[in-house]
Image: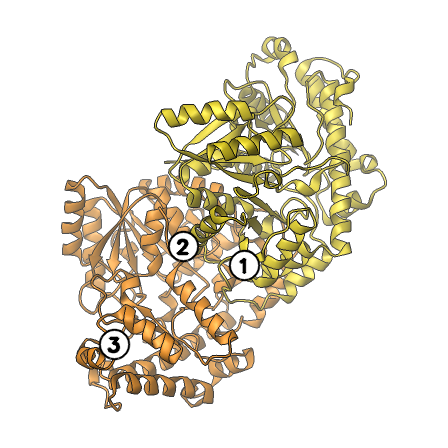
Chain colours: A orange, B yellow
Amino acid sequence: MPVAVSATLAADEALARRRLAGQEVLSLASGEVGLPVLPRLRSLLADAAGRNAYGPVPGSPRLRAAAAGYWARRGLPVDPGLVVCGPGSKPLLFALMLAVGGDVVVPVPSWVSYSAQARLAGARAVPVPTPPGEGGVPDPDALREAVAAARSGGRDPRSVVVTLPDNPTGTIASPRTVRRLARAARELGLVVISDEIYRDLVFDPADRIASPALYAPERTVITTGVTKNLALGGWRLGVARLPDSDTGRELHTRLLGVVSQIWSSTAAPVQEAAAYALEEPPEVTARVTASRRLHGTVVREAARRFAAAGTVLTPVRATSYLYPDFEPLREDLVRLHGIRGGTALTELLMERYGVGVLPGAVFGEPDDPLRIRIATSRLYGETDAERTAALTARDPLELPWIRAALDRVTEVLHDLTGRPPGPAPDGARP
Amino acid sequence: MPVAVSATLAADEALARRRLAGQEVLSLASGEVGLPVLPRLRSLLADAAGRNAYGPVPGSPRLRAAAAGYWARRGLPVDPGLVVCGPGSKPLLFALMLAVGGDVVVPVPSWVSYSAQARLAGARAVPVPTPPGEGGVPDPDALREAVAAARSGGRDPRSVVVTLPDNPTGTIASPRTVRRLARAARELGLVVISDEIYRDLVFDPADRIASPALYAPERTVITTGVTKNLALGGWRLGVARLPDSDTGRELHTRLLGVVSQIWSSTAAPVQEAAAYALEEPPEVTARVTASRRLHGTVVREAARRFAAAGTVLTPVRATSYLYPDFEPLREDLVRLHGIRGGTALTELLMERYGVGVLPGAVFGEPDDPLRIRIATSRLYGETDAERTAALTARDPLELPWIRAALDRVTEVLHDLTGRPPGPAPDGARP
């Protein structure tokens, strides 16, 4: 079951090679958050450098208690005994697929690794489209049909993945849709794996994230980590919250078996610093708030520019992702470049402009639509000084390096489409 | 495909619970190395705490170059482009099984996780006994028979795991056996996965480790890490060396796909400190030398005491493991305790004496023989001060806490067997 290197990581490395070769690049492919480590977390990792014991398979008691507190503050209390830590939420998602077994329903579009992980787990992904404007959650009615069809075809779907908020669209499924999804999962006997790694990056405080754990608590696993809210991707730490039910406890036992046999435990010094982060003292909360504001400001300005160039976007409400549709520009793209799909569009953006993006196809979209995913979380600067300035600026859009990157977006879109930028339609405004 | 929690990790947690409950325990189950982090490595991890980018999937260029240098100094030069890093050599072994595909030949006895990982990878382990006194390498003739039988039975073995030096026996297969194994693997078209995590813990400098990479370089993958030689298990870092051949390069591509989809990359601060360790400056070499001497002194004294109690052991030449056979004491064990197998013996040692060991059965031995694995790497002290004293002591056996632990072994064996300790047979002496 060969799988290709993760498209986001591969695009990132291609950009790094071009940069090393002295070429101008604009990195809009990887969702890595280009912000510095909060100084207090850096010093806590340093203080914990002497920790060289494996420690418990699911993570240290302090880390698990901290994660339980994190969820309790979000209306999702949990026994720390049902928390499992891993070297990223990504390996936890894979371990969960192995522990649940069977095929895995994934939304379309969705993050590049769900389907690849299902294949590595010896299963198959069952793709189900999301409702319009509500990325990350398979349409509940389409889910019922797809699972029925899969089962009558001899396949064995046992879980459904949801992404709240969503990558690649930056949208948030409505509570009503999540509730309907949860009900469908219960009727179908599916475990819900709710990837909530972007939960802390919702721009409007009035926007509620309704986890499926609220509606189907007995069967919903939540995963998150410190990669997106605190820019600690390279530290590799994630946590999973298992359901407090017979299903959940049985799954917990199976998951610990998988975890103990694949990776034993998670880097002990990192656990120590991450525990502090998940305890959310004021300095941590302040940093997450500043990051969220920065993400929102920059990604929505980027959205405005894509909209002004004639692409169509659902308003972005979280994350640092855009998912513009170039369909309205199809005739121009065919006429000027012979381009008919997102994959060719991505290649052109890289080769002609040094702009790294990802095509909708890698998010599981059939028929290679003219959609690309844009990540703006690498535009905050090249140095810690620039990145810190971006975090604290009154208006980050006035910082020269951020402004230059966004102006480069406008320039490339103009050159690509042969159209001067127009006013953005209202729908694309924040 | 449910798998149980790793037996070593489970035993370790059971001991920790007993200790917390105030009971006297002697931890001889886990192979975790109870020694402090080398101060320089601690400060390098601290200095690298600001590294929060994912970095390249296979590891940083510096880490890969350092690993290549490590192998070059051992007569196994490799292009750093064929080195792949992971959060432990354990996940690398699992990723290799997924990347190679097919069933996996494992030695009997062998480390608890090989077979479990094969099952998680959707494959099966093909058990093959090792030649007498040469743990870790399947007997080459038996390998040929087992692979032929598996293939004619419709199974598809594509790789064979070897452990050099061996866990659980602490022995080292002879160069002749390794060469014959390599030849058999070539004839059978098997990839050799050579787990050399204990390579730096060979007591006698004259004892040569003959890696199968010397005899079948085109098909041998080597894994190692900083867990055993530098006691950094809780940091979670391992490296794999892939063959410089068409097979190796194809496997490298597949492995990167697997790695990128399961864990993305390895904790960046840990990579930085581990790179320094793998560069082996004099202070690192000195620490490894001191650790090796300590391991050898303590494990061989423990061997002497098991031999004096009437068990049979192959002389231990590396690691901190013993694998005593209680078969000569069978009648006593049956008469005194009704014990007929290693599993019951392990349970009795834990329940009556608070002594944690592992039965041969968890290492894949059929018919639950009266063999147990003893790990002595946790006897060096409870505090960093005690452990540092153990590393630097002229005679570690004179340190009160080490002497007390070893005397407790003698006392328990005496009580267990009803026999006073006798002189050790010559074969068990170092």
Secondary structure of the residue carrying numbered label 1: loop
Residue at horizontal 34 percent and vertical 75 percent from the top: A203
| Residue at image mark 3 | A315
Mark 3 against mark 1, which lies toward the viewer? 1
Q: Estimate the spatial distance between the alpha carbons at disc 1 and disc 2, rounded to whole Å.
A: 15 Å
Picture quadrant of residue A403: bottom left
Give how far across and how far down residue B349 sits, in percent.
Answer: 61, 24
Whether residue A241 is visible to the viewer of this picture, yes or no, is no
Checking the image for residue B379, the label placed there is none
Quarter that holds the C terminus of chain A: bottom left
Q: Is residue B157 left or right of residue B289?
A: left
Q: Estimate the spatial distance between the alpha carbons at disc 3 and disc 2, rounded to whole Å.
A: 29 Å
Q: Amino acid at mark 1?
A: Gly
Mark 3 against mark 2, which lies toward the viewer? 2
Q: Estimate the spatial distance between the alpha carbons at disc 3 and disc 1, rounded to whole Å.
A: 37 Å
Q: Amino acid at mark 3?
A: Pro
Q: Chain letter of disc 1?
A: B
| Residue at image mark 1 | B59
Which mark sits nearer the N-terminus, 1 or 2?
A: 1
Q: Chain letter of disc 2?
A: B
Q: Examine the rendered structure and indicate whether residue A243 appears above or below residue B334.
A: below
Residue at horizontal 23 percent and vertical 59 percent from the top: A178
Give how far across and how far down residue A220 sits, in percent.
Answer: 30, 51
Q: Amino acid at mark 2?
A: Gln
Q: Chain letter of disc 3?
A: A
Q: Residues within 10 Å of mark 1 (few under 14, many from 20)?
A: many
Residue at horizontal 75 percent and vertical 51 percent from the top: B285
